[in-house]
Image (cartoon, helix red, strand yellow):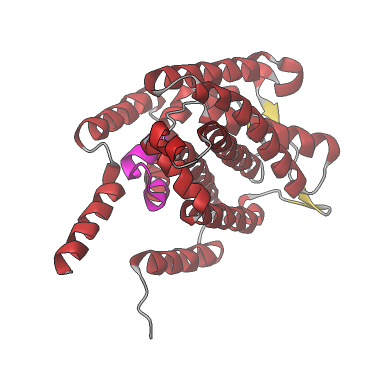
Amino acid sequence: MKKLSGDQLALIIGALVLAALPFTSSGYVLYVVNLLMVFVVLALGMHVVIGEAGQFALSHTAFYGIGIYTAGLINTTWHPPFVVSILAGGVLAAIMGYIIGLLALRMRDIYLALATFSFGEAMQWVFLNWDKVTGGSNGMRMEPAELFGYKLTNDLQAYPFVMVLTALMLWLTVALSRSQFGSALRAVRESDVAALAMGIHVRRMKQTAFAISAAYAGIAGGMYTLFTSFIHPESLGFQTTILVLTMVVVGGIGSVRGAIAGALAFGLLSELLRQALSIQEIIYGAILMGFMMFMPKGLFADRNKRVARVKEAQA
C-alpha cells in the first residue's frame, strides 16, 4: 500500500475536521471558519502574483472589495443564483487586474509596490465616497445570496458552499503551480531576460498573473457575501492588504502550503485582536518586518529547503 505524504495526510485530516464542524460547533465558530476560508483564497491569489510571478503588488484588497460590492449589488438587485454573482465579481476583478498588470511591464520592486498601493488606496476612496452605489461611509446592507430561490441566511447554510469553493480554488492553485504555465511564471520571477531567452512571452505572463490573482480576490469577495449581510469600506483598507501580505510572507513566498498556513494563523490572530484594532497594524507590521529581515523566505519555504537537503544527503 502506498504511503501517504504529509500534504495528503494534512488534506485528509482537514477535510474530516471541516466535515464534522457543522455538527459540533456554534454559529460563531462557523462564521470564523467561513472567514478563514475566504482568507485562504485571498492568500492563494496573492501567492500567484508574488510567489509564482514575483510581482510585488499591494492592490489585492481593492480587487477583494470589487468582488464584494459586485456580488452584493447583483444579489440585491437581481437575485440570481450566487454562482453568477461570484463569477461576475471574479471576472470584473480580473479585468481590472489585467489593466493594472500593465504597470508591471514598466515598474519593478518598490516602484510597482507603490503604484499598486496607490491603486488600492484610490479604490478605497471610491468605496467610501460613491454613496449611490456602495453606501459610502454608512456601508452597504446586502440581501442574502440565493441558489434557485433558496436563501443563505446564516453561517451554517453558507458553510458547505464556502468550503466547496475554497477546495476548488485550492485545486486550481496546485494545478496552476504544477503546469507548464506555472513553470513559465516562475521563470519570469527569477529573470525576465532568461525567460525571454527561453521563448517565454514575459509581458503576457505578468499581465495574466495579475488577472488571475485579481480573479482570486474577486471570488473571495463573492464568497464573503455568502455569509455576511453588511460591508463597510473601512474593512477594505491598507490594514487588510498588510494582513494578507503577512500571511504569504510568513507562510513562505512561493509555497502553496505556506499561503494556507499563513491564512489560517493570521486569520485567527485578526479575530483574536478584534477588540484591539489600534494595535493590529503595529503587530502585523512588526511580524512582517521580523520575517523580512531574518527569515525572508518564510516558514514553509525554509522547510522545503531542509527536506531537499535531507533527501540529497540520503541519496
Query: Vertical placement of 184 versus 171: above or below?
Result: above
Residue nearest the viewer, comparing 155 with 40: 40
Q: Which residues are magenta?
A: 245-259
Which residue is located at x 71 percent, y 50 percent?
152
Q: Tag count in the figure?
A: 0
- The residue shown at (51%, 41%) is 45
Q: Is residue 193 magenta?
A: no
Residue 114 horizontal side relative to residue 305, left or right: right
Residue 204 x %, y %: 57, 34
**In the figure, 279 relative to 161: above or below?**
above
Q: Please, is residue 197 above or below residue 17 in the view?
A: above
Side (left or right) of 294 relative to 66: left
Could you tell whether 210 is left or right of 186 in the image? right
Q: Position of residue 259 (x, y in %)?
A: 41, 46
* Residue 89 visible within the image: yes
Residue in the foreground of this view, choosing between 270 and 103: 103
Residue at image position (19%, 58%) is 309
Provide residue 76's location: percent of width, then percent of height: 79, 36
Is 257 magenta? The answer is: yes
From the image, give the main secondary structure of the stretch colored magenta.
helix
**Picture quadrant where residue 271 is located:** top left
Residue 84: x percent and y percent? 76, 45
Q: Farthest residue toward the left?
A: 313
Q: Quadrant of the C terminus?
A: bottom left
Q: Nearer the viewer, residue 195 or 244?
A: 195
